[in-house]
Every structure is written in C-alpha cells, then in structure tokens.
Amino acid sequence: MKQANSTAECVPSSGTSSATAGIAEDAKNSSPSSEAHFPYEHTAVVTSFDNTETASTLLSRPDRYKQLFTALSASSVISRGAGLTYCLASTSSQGRSVLSAQYNRFLGFDAESKVVRVEPGVTMGALFEFASARSLLPPVLPGYPLVTVGGAVAMNIHGKNQFRAGNFGDHVRNIGLYHPRSGEINCGPELNPRLFRLTLGGFGLTGHITSVDIGLRSFTGRSLTVERHNVADLVEAGHLMESLSDHSEYTYSWHNLNLRGRRFGAGTVYSEHPNNGEISISGKRRTSFSTTKPLLCRLYNRMTVPMLCGAYQMKEKVAPRATGSDLYSAFFPFVGKELYFRLYGKKGFREYQALFPRERWEEACSRIAEAVRQCRVMILLASTKIFRGEASFLNFSGNGICLALDTPNTPSSVDFFARLDKITIDLGGIANISKDGRLSASTVRAMYGDRYETFRGALRDYDPQRHFQSELRRRLDL
C-alpha cells in the first residue's frame, strides 16, 4: 500500500464527526467524573439512534495511540464510531466506550489497484468525496454520510445495490485489528481469514479496528438518472425489482402501508443508472445527527401519518418518469431531511428490517398486511431491496427480498414487532440485528439457527475472556 502522496490524502478527513451522536448534551461538556481512570474520559449517557435505549457509560476520547491502547486495555470495553446504530452496539454500561473520532486519516492509496487505506473514524461521506474526486466510488454506501468505516465493518452494512455489490465487507481487503492480548494483527481474505470473517459484521467484538483497506470501483458518470415505476403493492414491487436488477446499478422502493385492502403497499420502485450529465457533485453539504434533538412531543399521529404518506405517494405518481440527481444527494438521501427523525418525538421510533426468501415473499406480504391491520400501527416509511449473496454468521446477508419499516415507538408497535418476529421465523427469514434493540437472544437464535451458534462459539474460542463487551453482546448472550 502506497502512502498518500498529497496533503489532502494524509490529513484527517474533512467530514464533520458525529462520534457524539446520541450522547447527552450535558455529559459532553462535563468534567471527568470520579469514576474516570484517565483525564480523557468522563461518564456520559448514551442513546441509541432510534431514541429507544439509553445507558450510562465511561466515554473515552483518546487522541493518541498510546492513550487509545491504554483505554482498550481496561475490561468490558467496546469501540465506538458515529453511534448511528439503532441498538447499543458500541456502549458498555459496565465498562467504557472508546471513541475513534480522532482516528480519521487517509493512510494510503494505490491508484493502480484502486485500494485505499483509512483509519476507522473516516466517515463514509469523506470516503465518497475522496473516491469521487478520482472518478471512483466506494462499492457500498449507506444512507447516512456520517457512518464511519469502522462501523461499516462492524455491522457489514449494505446499500441500495446489495444485489449487485453485496455487503461492505465484500470489498474490504485487509483489516488492522488491535486486541490487548495479542497486540496489532492484520486479517484479510487470505491472511487470518477466519478472524477476518468473524470481524466483518462481528459488532466490534473481536477487537478495535486500527485500519481498513477498501477496494474502490471505477465510476465515470457525473450524476444518476432516477427512473420511477409505480406499483400496486409489495408483491408487484418484488417482481419488478428482480426484472430491473439486471440492468440497474441501484434499485429500491417506497410503499404506503397505511392503505387498506387492495391498495395496501402501493408505491414506487426506483432504478438508478449513471450518466454524464452536467449535474455537479456537491462536496459541501454536511449534517450531524448529534444536533438533531427529537422534539418533546411526537407530531406523527393517526391523522398526520396517512396525510404525509398520501401526499408523498401522489407526488411520486405525478413526477416525471426519469429525473437527474447529483451523486451526493442520491447516495445520502437523508441529508437535509433530518426533521424526519426529530418529528418522532422524545420516545423515538422503531425500525424492523427483515430479509425473506424470494419464494416466501408473497406470503410474507400477506401476513404483514394482516399484522398491520390487527395492530393498527402507523408506518411512516416502508422500503424494499433485492439481496443476493452468501449468508455468513450474524451478518444481514443472503438471497431474498428485504423489507424495512419505520413506526413511532408505541405499545402497538412493540406488539407489531413481536408479530413480525414470528412471521420472519416462520418463513425462514432473518432480522437486521443492527436495526433493532429489542431482539432477544432466543429470537435471534431462532432466526439465524446454526449461524448464531457457530458465531457465538467462534467468538468465544477466539476470545474466551470476552474482553470486548457491549449492551448488544449481553442482550444476545454472545
């Protein structure tokens, strides 16, 4: 790996850090508490991104590697990136959460192989800007630009093109990993492959990531053409996306699940293709979820939700069949729309994301429609994607159709999600662990089967002392 040969490539990334996302405002400015062992630590209350879980932890913010390794040597420790997961995967109430925000440099770039080496605190937005300036793109991008590379590895995230590019880990060439027991080691597809597979989607439980080598891909388009296809329901959307996937770079959909009868799930399928239009790439837009505090009261209710979803559905119906979008807006659609999350109020929201086998998709849609009707839940956002690839450990990966639902955090939504658990298990599907802080160990075991037991056993064989701990690990009995 060649060292970066320009100032812009070796300095910390320019993306605004959101490592404080979900941390109580009064804790951010507090002095070190009596519990703190080091001057760069203090006690803080951490909240999950969906605002449904909180935990107090010793928050460590080292800015030198000596401090970092000292903090990681303590027991019950876990690394923390942007804190944008919907569960407390990077929080340890019985120990410390170690922030990687200060470790956000581009360490090297090999133009010939298109491989870039970065520290874990580099954001996906900064990685996008680095790549697009060289007519390249990260093959997999999340919807939020402030997700860190370390978090992308720990959750093995996917994007709108999972059917074509797989998960983020499919493009990782090497991971630098630190564990107090063994020091710094490298792992990759050929070097320490078992540890590499255990680390991808391993929730940060194998150690602290110090560097990641990522394979970028060529991308000559300057913008994306977005084509709209109106569909009558979820089943039609699944069939259409399958047919579009052969010639689309990105395919996904939006649906209105607040309708009843035959209209349930009507919506729009989107397919996106690169073009060389004159739409400029914006590199100046920034957002920080740490500043998007929820409103005190929820403004989504049984009157406003159908109105909002109906208005969006009508807007998409009358929109031109094809429109253009700059790359930044297309890849990070929630930038500038953070109000969507604020309007859920201080009680937050819940998201359920499940992957169903293709052959069970129609049955899944029917049963979900019945669950929505019986529980009378309000669905703010419903989206589907096509998945292809191999299943691995507790990664949200495999073959099938993915459905994601957002709903206000209410007693009816808890009942609804319990029904979704049963539907998912009955139909041989899996839920996305990173999107749901409610999933129990027994539920995950029932969904993932042997993959759960294999991952749990391999993790404990690798680290029998279970040095790296989190609220997620305790909840799932890993």
Image (cartoon, rainbow, N blue to C red):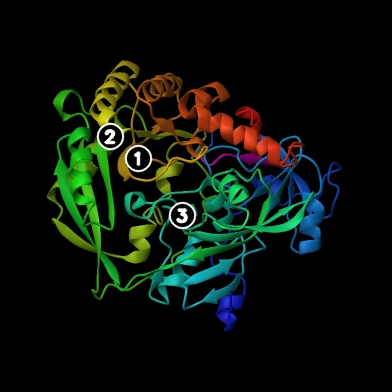
Disc marking residue 358: 2
Considering the image in quadrants, where does the C terminus appear?
Answer: top right
Can I make out residue 471 in this image?
yes
The image quadrant of residue 358 is top left
- 27 vs 257, left or right, is right
Q: What type is the residue that disc 2 sits on?
A: Arg
Q: How crowded is the residue under tag 3: few (<14 C-alpha within 10 Å), some, or many (20+)?
A: some
Q: What type is the residue that disc 1 sits on?
A: Asn
Viewer-nearest residue: 378 or 422 = 422
Can I make out residue 54 in this image?
no
Q: Which residue is mark 3?
A: 170
Residue at the spot x=83%, y=46% of the render?
36
- 83 vs 369, left or right, is right
Considering the image in quadrants, where does the N terminus appear?
Answer: bottom right
Check residue 201 for magenta coloring: no
Q: Give x and y (percent) for residue 20.
A: 62, 51
Q: Secondary structure at mark 1?
A: loop
Viewer-nearest residue: 163 or 159 = 163
Task: Tell me the distance, in whole angstroms, between the alpha carbons under discs 2 and 1.
Answer: 8 Å
Identify the magenta region.
Answer: 45-49
Confirm or deny contact between disc 3 and disc 1 (CB under 8 A).
no
Task: Tell me the distance, in whole angstroms, between the alpha carbons under discs 3 and 1.
Answer: 15 Å
Residue at the front extreme of this rendering = 190
Q: Which residue is mark 1?
A: 399
